[in-house]
Image (cartoon, helix red, strand yellow):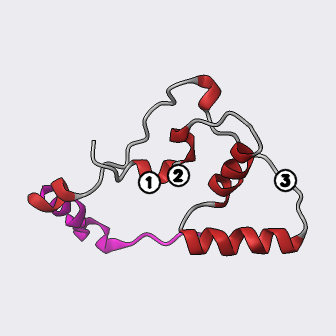
Amino acid sequence: MAEVLDDAEEYVADDRWESAKKLDMGEVSKSLPDISVAAPRDPKKERKGSAVSLPAYVWTMLRQKSGNDEEPVNVIIMRGLRELGFEIDDDDLIDPRKLRYMKK
């Protein structure tokens, strides 16, 4: 059976959260980047994930190029498709994660 605690009435609520909410970040919060995600411009431009089966050595080369160029693998693949004649917009060749840090 559950035991009744006599000192339960003496419990004092922890107010650290309330004091943290009152903390004024001042200029620090204004200098942080805006991480809100904008709505897609065009339904055709919505990004969708897909699995691509490639030999292991190809994935190794893609990861190495991605690291050397500091560019994600999907952008490298789209650049290759563009060279083959696929119509890919310039703005789609920018990593969408980097757009939030660009000056507006």
The earlier-in-sequence mark between 3 and 1 is 3
Looking at this view, is 13 or 51 the one in front?
51
The residue at the point 83 percent across, 69 percent down is: 58
Q: Start and end of the magenta stretch? A: 1-23
Looking at this view, is 8 or 28 the one in front?
28
Specify whether residue 24 is in view. Answer: no
User: What residue is shown with label 2?
Assistant: 95
Q: Are marks 1 and 2 in contact (CB under 8 Å)?
A: yes
**Mark 3 to mark 1 CA distance (whole Å):** 24 Å
User: What residue is shown with label 3?
Assistant: 52
**Mark 3 to mark 2 CA distance (whole Å):** 19 Å
Q: Label 1 crowding class (10 Å Cα cut-off): few <14, some 14-19, many 20+?
A: few
The residue at the point 51 percent across, 30 percent down is: 40
Left or right, 70 with respect to 65, comes to left
**Mark 1 to mark 2 CA distance (whole Å):** 6 Å
The residue at the point 42 percent across, 48 percent down is: 99
The residue at the point 31 percent across, 48 percent down is: 34
Q: In this picture, is 36 found above or below 42?
A: below
Q: Is residue 10 magenta?
A: yes
Looking at this view, is 52 or 4 the one in front?
52
Three-letter residue code for mark 1: Lys
Q: In this picture, is 75 found above or below 19?
A: above
